[in-house]
Image: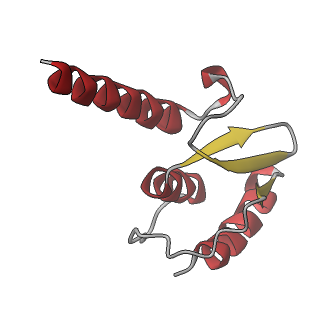
Amino acid sequence: MRMDQALLVLGELSKQYAGKVIIDLEKHKNPIGVYIVNQHWRDALEMICRRNGLTMVEEADFIRLTSAGPTMVSESQMRPACRTANRLRHWKARMSGSRRSS
């Protein structure tokens, strides 16, 4: 399934159950890259974000997806699963850098 198709479905569930729209300003159309069966919509969205290097920023009325590259989003604004994935990425980067310098 393509990202835009998955976000359309998840966006409807998000509106219905959380009252928030999902915004993907980059209009991703790549495959989601994960198999999702019988999952809560928010868990599915977090899984898709992790797999595709995206960060969820949750505001009062919407959830914005951004590339996990350099960003102005504070860690406290991220969902817990995305915070954990973000910390893991930073840890792996530090570890790979320390191996190269030894």
Residue at left offset 44%, top offset 68%: 38
Point out residue 46 in the picture as x, y percentages from the top left corner: 52, 50
For this view, does 89 lie left or right of residue 9? left
Point out residue 53 in the picture as x, y percentages from the top left corner: 50, 51
Vertical position of residue 44 compared to residue 92: above or below? below
The quadrant holding residue 33 is bottom left
Point out residue 91 in the picture as x, y percentages from the top left corner: 33, 25
Vertical position of residue 23 compared to residue 62: above or below? below
The image's colouring method is secondary structure
Residue at left offset 73%, top offset 61%: 26
For this view, does 72 lie left or right of residue 40? right
Q: Residue furthest front?
A: 101
Residue at left offset 67%, top offset 23%: 74
For this view, does 39 lie left or right of residue 95? right
Q: Could you say which is closer to the camera, residue 14 or residue 57?
A: 57
Residue at left offset 67%, top offset 48%: 66
Q: Residue furthest left?
A: 102
For this view, does 28 lie left or right of residue 102? right
